[in-house]
Image (cartoon, grey):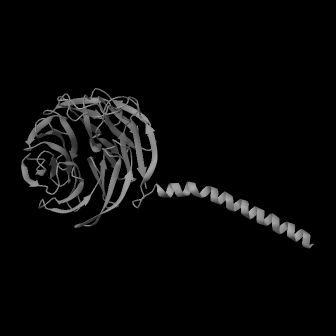
Amino acid sequence: MRDHRKIWLACAAVLALVAALVVIGRRPVKAQESSATGKSGYHLITKVKLGGEGGWDYLTADPASRRLFISHGTHVMVVDADEGKVVGDIPNTQGVHGIALVPDMNKGFTSNGKTATSTVFDMKTLQPLGEATTEKNPDAIIYDPASKRVFTFNGGSDSATAIDAATGKTVGTVALGGGPEFAASDGKGHVFVNLEDKSQLVKFDPVTLKVEKTWPLAPCESPSGLAIDAEHEILIVGCHNKIMAFVDGSSGTVIGTVPICQGVDANRFDPATGFAFASCGDGTVTVAHEDSTDKFSVVDTIQTQKGARTMELDTSNHNLYLVSADFGPTPAATPEHPRPRPPIIPDTFTLLIFGR
């Protein structure tokens, strides 16, 4: 009887050891998942190769249709925002930079940098509906719901073009006094735009097309990305001297700054979480938090991919979308090209989706 008990105890000990080893064997997977998730809770959900050739710029999400519109050289790729699969395409948008959506009219607008035009398209069928003329090199593009106008920001003419969203026709121009980069609307009758070459922020009336204020952004230098906390009228500005500036949209006062990554090109703000994001070409996203209307702090640095400088936020599920590609070696500088860029390797264009 005692021998049987010894055998049973020995077997139980072996089984316990095996179970422990199995658990230990599983732990590294959980540890890796945990280490990939920072304080913000963001981690890579999926990485999808989209392929094709050419450069890219802005991304725009439509939470209702679960579609993501991605500029890609001469066309706009339309991608399932959840699965990352290409579901459509908008061709013949030469040098396209951005896409603005007007869901209540079922229309989208592109900014075609090489042709100084905006392609108007049906959001459901993706078929072209017309074309509006802009000034030279339209880059950023936004929709202002207060005026029901789409605005392109024209880097080659220091201006903004106003397009009536209902008719798709150009209705006016705003002289900005400097080179515009990105813009934001508060939905209350004000549009804001960065002047990258002047390190200034312009505020204008989208109905009268008159500039109301032009503010210096010091200590911010060479502002690029721009987002807005519309409820509190706070602008979130990404600056190339590696800071994110928070600006009072009523007074133009810089009310706070936080350090960010290198090579910022896009900013987003999530009103539900209070997170402000800056995406950078160095392959990271800085996540800051609006602790109060005059206090801001860095929460996290998300590792993305080198070159993933532009970004979109889906406020319905808080996902972040970024795109990049693989690059070849940087060519030597020449008098014609003193700051050459590394070439994009064809067919490596990739979408990265991050979630919490």
**84 left or right of 153 in image:** right
Question: Which residue does the image show at 29% across and 41% down from the upper left?
Answer: 58
State the image coordinates of residue 211 (x, y, percent, origin top left). 7, 49
The quadrant in which the N terminus is found is bottom right
Nearer the observer, 165 or 101: 101
State the image quarter where residue 272 is shown. Answer: bottom left
Whether residue 166 is visible here, answered yes or no, is: no
Residue 244, compared with residue 57, is above or below; it is: below
Question: Which residue does the image show at 24% across and 30% down from the upper left?
Answer: 95
State the image coordinates of residue 79 (x, y, percent, origin top left). 39, 38
Residue 353, compared with residue 228, is above or below; it is: above
Nearer the observer, 224 or 250: 224
Whether residue 89 is visible here, answered yes or no, is: yes
Nearer the observer, 214 or 197: 197
**30 left or right of 203 in image:** right
Residue 48, compared with residue 147, is above or below; it is: above
State the image quarter where residue 134 is shown. Answer: top left
State the image coordinates of residue 245 (x, y, percent, origin top left). 21, 57
Q: Name the outermost residue toward the bottom.
A: 2
Question: Which residue does the image show at 40% across and 61% down from the upper left?
Answer: 39
The quadrant in which the C terminus is found is bottom left
Residue 26, compared with residue 76, is above or below; it is: below
